[in-house]
């Protein structure tokens, strides 16, 4: 599995290099593009995207607070925000960001840490559901417009298939008992049932709230991407641009990665391909996508380093 992930990451970065960086004078053109953006009309959209960073991670903290309060009724927003930022930092260099689980779990009291695994999974799965629903709609747009034109039966088929995929994505979220039953049928996966056993104890109202916050957060980072695209000079109809952004995030979520750095190649390759279908040049799209990674992942991860000494498990160890 590790070798497969390394292979996917190297292949993605290689394709990205071949499609963008192999062009002559790319470095000079990139420097000129970034300089003109930060010093000209693009500065306003960049600052607007930066201003949305606290909202992005604040919504994630709010979602985690709702999930954690189910385990610890007095869990505060401040503790949730600290756990989210610490999780972002620890997840920066861990496969599939498992450090995010560790930080949130260790911020809870020891007696509830086993159940917290299921709570973290539920929050991450809610975000995945939002990504699949929006991203699936975005990819359907590209399939119908660019690949299935003149084939109405095929268009109807992919639309039905897209609806089924969306329904299947929602099913484990609202019917988690079915997920636990499925895990019981596969011997290697049975050990995970005890970690996820807390999921069916969340009420429908709590699940609605968690999914709603996930949707709001999805809208925020989509808006950030669109602002950065505009800053770097990408112009075009809003609808197709939103579809390309949604498709980009879906590809990034579905491809397994070694760490947050490997995510960069997946997102950038997806973005340049989808926007290329819309007739947009690769370099501004690549710049916007890299900038999104810097403002949403790299900078908050650096902030999380400052909070690391305050991790609950370290405070408990020092108190002994």
Image (spheres, rainbow, N blue to C red):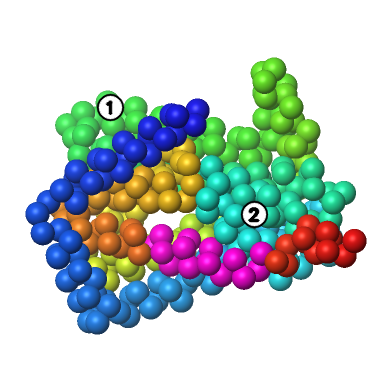
- Residue for point 25% across, 40% down: 15
**Vertically, is 273 above or below 213?**
above
Q: Is residue 79 visible?
A: yes
Residue identified by numbered label 1? 154
- Name the N-terminal-most of marks 1 and 2: 1
Residue most toward the right? 320
Residue 86 screen position, x and y as percent = 63, 61
From the image, which quarter does the C terminus lie in? bottom right
Which one is in front, 24 or 69?
24
The residue stretch that appears in magenta:
292-308
- Residue for point 60% across, 55% down: 90
Between tags 1 and 2, which lies in front?
A: 2
* Position of residue 211 in the picture relative to residue 28 (left or right): right
Residue 297 screen position, x and y as percent = 48, 61
Mark 1 packing: few (<14 Cα in 10 Å), some, or many (20+)? some
Quarter holding residue 293: bottom left
**Vertically, is 248 above or below 227?**
above
1 and 2 marks in contact (CB < 8 Å): no
* Position of residue 291 in the picture relative to residue 54 (left or right): left
Instruction: Count the numbered circles shown.
Output: 2
Residue 185 screen position, x and y as percent = 69, 17
Q: Secondary structure at mark 1?
A: helix
Q: State how far apart marks 1 and 2 are (Cα).
A: 35 Å
- Residue for point 59% across, 66% down: 305
Q: Is residue 76 magenta?
A: no
Q: Secondary structure at mark 2?
A: helix
- Residue for point 19% across, 50% down: 20
Magenta stretch: dominant SS?
helix
The numbered mark at residue 210 is 2
Q: Is residue 236 visible?
A: no
């Amino acid at each position: 599995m590790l070798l497969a992930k390394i292979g996917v990451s190297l292949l993605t970065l290689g394709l990205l290099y071949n499609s963008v960086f192999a062009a002559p004078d790319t470095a000079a053109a990139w420097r000129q593009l970034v300089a003109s953006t930060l010093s000209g009309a693009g500065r306003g959209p960049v600052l607007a995207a930066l201003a949305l960073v606290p909202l992005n991670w604040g919504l994630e903290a709010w979602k985690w607070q709702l999930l954690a309060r189910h385990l610890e009724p007095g869990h505060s927003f401040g503790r949730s925000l600290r756990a989210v930022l610490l999780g972002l930092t620890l997840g920066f260099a861990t496969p599939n960001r498992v450090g995010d689980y560790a930080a949130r779990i260790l911020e809870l009291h020891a007696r509830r840490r086993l159940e917290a695994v299921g709570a973290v999974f539920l929050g991450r799965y809610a975000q995945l559901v939002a990504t699949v629903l929006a991203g699936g709609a975005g990819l359907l747009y590209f399939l119908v417009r660019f690949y299935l034109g003149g084939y109405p039966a095929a268009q109807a088929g992919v639309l039905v298939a897209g609806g089924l995929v969306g329904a299947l994505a929602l099913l484990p979220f609202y019917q988690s008992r079915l997920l636990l039953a499925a895990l019981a049928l596969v011997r290697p996966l049975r050990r995970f049932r005890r970690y996820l056993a807390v999921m069916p104890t969340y009420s429908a109202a709590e699940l609605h709230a968690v999914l709603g916050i996930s949707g709001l957060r999805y809208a925020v980072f989509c808006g950030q991407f669109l602002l950065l695209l505009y800053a770097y000079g990408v112009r075009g109809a809003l609808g197709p641009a939103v579809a390309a952004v949604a498709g980009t995030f879906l590809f990034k979520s579905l491809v397994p990665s070694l760490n947050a750095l490997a995510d960069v190649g997946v997102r950038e390759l997806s973005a340049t391909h989808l926007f290329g279908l819309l007739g947009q040049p690769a370099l501004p799209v690549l710049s916007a996508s890299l900038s999104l990674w810097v403002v949403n992942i790299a900078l908050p991860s650096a902030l999380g380093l400052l909070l690391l000494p305050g991790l609950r498990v370290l405070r408990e160890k020092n108190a002994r």
